[in-house]
């Protein structure tokens, strides 16, 4: 499987990631790190505590990583959490609604990570 085929299988935006990283070699390097960098796990752990500061910081990090990697669905989902907990923004979602959205992020991530692992195994 090529990196382009990986992006097709995960619903990623290959054109976006190439605009950011410029070369398949760099895309390959960074997409492989997604399953080991711990950023999504940190977000999900922050959600267990409903810690507003940690939720903002980790969701903002996830949004950036995923946007740079062309993982638009994960980036958009993390952006919603980031804006919910951005200092100065009023809360719009209940804790239960936040938990539902974090569960969705976890589901998307697990599916994406499985495809990335399959890709990495060649």
Image: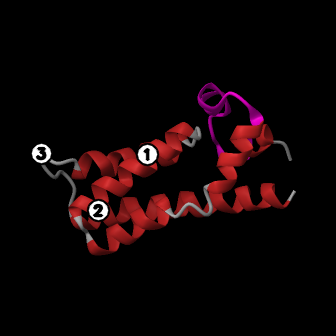
Tell me the residue that label 1 is attached to: 63
Rendered-image quadrant of the C terminus = bottom right
The residue where tag 2 is placed is 54
**Residue lying at 27% horizontally and 67% vertically, measured from the top left:** 96
Q: Earlier in the sequence, mark 2 or mark 1?
A: 2
Q: What is the quadrant of residue 94 in the picture?
A: bottom left
Q: Secondary structure at mark 2?
A: helix
Segment tinted magenta in the rendering: 8-24
Name which residue lies at 43% across and 45% down: 63
Quadrant location of residue 19? top right
Could you tell whether 51 is left or right of 64 in the image? left
Q: What residue is shown at x 16% (from left), y 52% (from top)?
A: 91
The percent position of residue 107, horizontal first and vertical second, equals: 53, 63
Disc number at residue 88?
A: 3
> Total of numbered circles in the picture?
3
Q: Is residue 19 magenta?
A: yes
Of the numbered discs 3 and 1, the one sitting upstream in the chain is 1
Is residue 27 positioned above or below 32 on the image? above
**Relative image position of residue 85 (x, y in whole percent):** 23, 52
Crowd band around label 3 with a 10 angstrom C-alpha radius: few (<14), some (14–19), many (20+): few
Where is residue 56? Give x, y as percent. 28, 54
């Amino acid at each position: 499987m090529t990196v382009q085929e990986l992006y097709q299988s995960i619903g990623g935006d290959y054109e976006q990631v190439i605009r950011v990283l410029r070369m398949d070699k760099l895309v390959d390097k960074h997409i492989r790190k997604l399953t080991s960098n711990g950023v999504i796990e940190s977000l999900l752990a922050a959600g267990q505590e409903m810690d507003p500061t940690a939720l903002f910081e980790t969701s903002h990090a996830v949004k950036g990583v995923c946007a740079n990697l062309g993982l638009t669905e994960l980036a958009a989902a993390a952006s919603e959490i980031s804006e919910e907990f951005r200092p100065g923004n009023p809360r719009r979602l209940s804790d239960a609604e936040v938990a539902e959205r974090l569960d969705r992020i976890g589901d998307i991530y697990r599916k994406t990570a499985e495809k990335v692992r399959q890709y990495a195994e060649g």
